[in-house]
Image: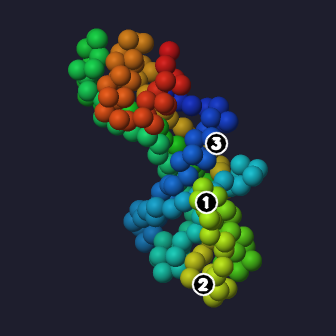
Amino acid sequence: MYLPDHFKISEAEEIFSFLDANAFGQLVSKHDDRFVVSHLPFLISTDRKHLHCHLARQNPQWRQLEGQQLLVTFQGPHDYVSPSWYQSPGVPTWNYQAVHVYGGCRVFDGASELATLVEALSARYESAFENPWEPQYRDAMLTAIVGVEISIDEILCKYKLSQNRSVADQQGVIDRLEELGSESLVRAMRKTLL
C-alpha cells in the first residue's frame, strides 16, 4: 500500500479499534500461481497477535494456505471527493480508510478448535440481536469448514481523509459528504480535522 506520511496511522489502539469495527476483510493468497481472494469476517486474538477466520472446505483456497505469507485487507468508509468542494485548486480523489495485515498462516480442522472459533464468531455478531442465536449445530457441520490462523507480522494503516488539504478544504469536503449522507466517513474525517 502506498502510504504517504500525512495519511499513515501508527497508533496501535486506533488501528485495532478500526479492525474491530471493520472486521469483514479480504483474505488474499496465491493458489496455483494466481492470486485468489475470499471475503470473510475475522476475529482478532485477545493478545492481538493473530487473526482468525474459517473457510468452506469446498473453497480450494485453503488447500495452499499453510505456511504461506498472506495479505488480509480491511476497508472502512469511503467516498468520492470532488475538487469543486475545495476553496483552492485540486483534483478528483477518493477518501477512505484501509488496513493491510501481513502474516504467516496455519490451517486447522480439529473439531474442538473449530467449535471455539465458530462460537467466538457467533458471540461477536449475534450479541447485537435481542434474541441471539445460541450455537446449536451437529458436530458433523464442523467438517464442512477449515479454520485459518494468521500471525500478525506487519500492519499498514492508511486514513486518506483530506489531511493534505487546508482546514477550509477539509471542512468543505465534510460539509458536502454530510449533505450526501456519507455519515461514517464524515465522523472519521472530523476525528482527523487539523
| Residue 71 in picture, x, y percent from top left | 52, 54
Q: Which residue is rendered at x = 45% and y = 69% of the image?
A: 31
Name the N-terminal-most of marks 2 and 3.
Answer: 3
Amino acid type assigned to the residue bearing label 1 in the image: Glu
| Residue marked by disc 3 | 16
Q: How is the image coloured?
A: rainbow
Image quadrant in which you'd find residue 91: top left
Q: Using the image, tell me which numbered label, if any, was put on residue 103.
A: none
Q: Is residue 47 visible?
A: yes
Q: Helix or strand or loop: what does disc 1 sit on?
A: loop
Residue drawn at the location 42% of the way across and 64% of the way down: 36
Place of residue 149 in the rendered image (x, y in percent of width and height, measured from the top left) = 65, 63
Label 2: how many Cα within 10 Å (few below 14, some 14–19, many 20+)? few
Residue 73 locus on image (x, y percent): 49, 50
Q: Is residue 30 left or right of residue 148?
A: left
In the image, taking residue 106 as reference, residue 35 lies left or right, namely left
Q: Which residue is under mark 2? A: 141
Q: Can residue 2 be seen here? A: no
Q: Secondary structure at mark 2?
A: helix
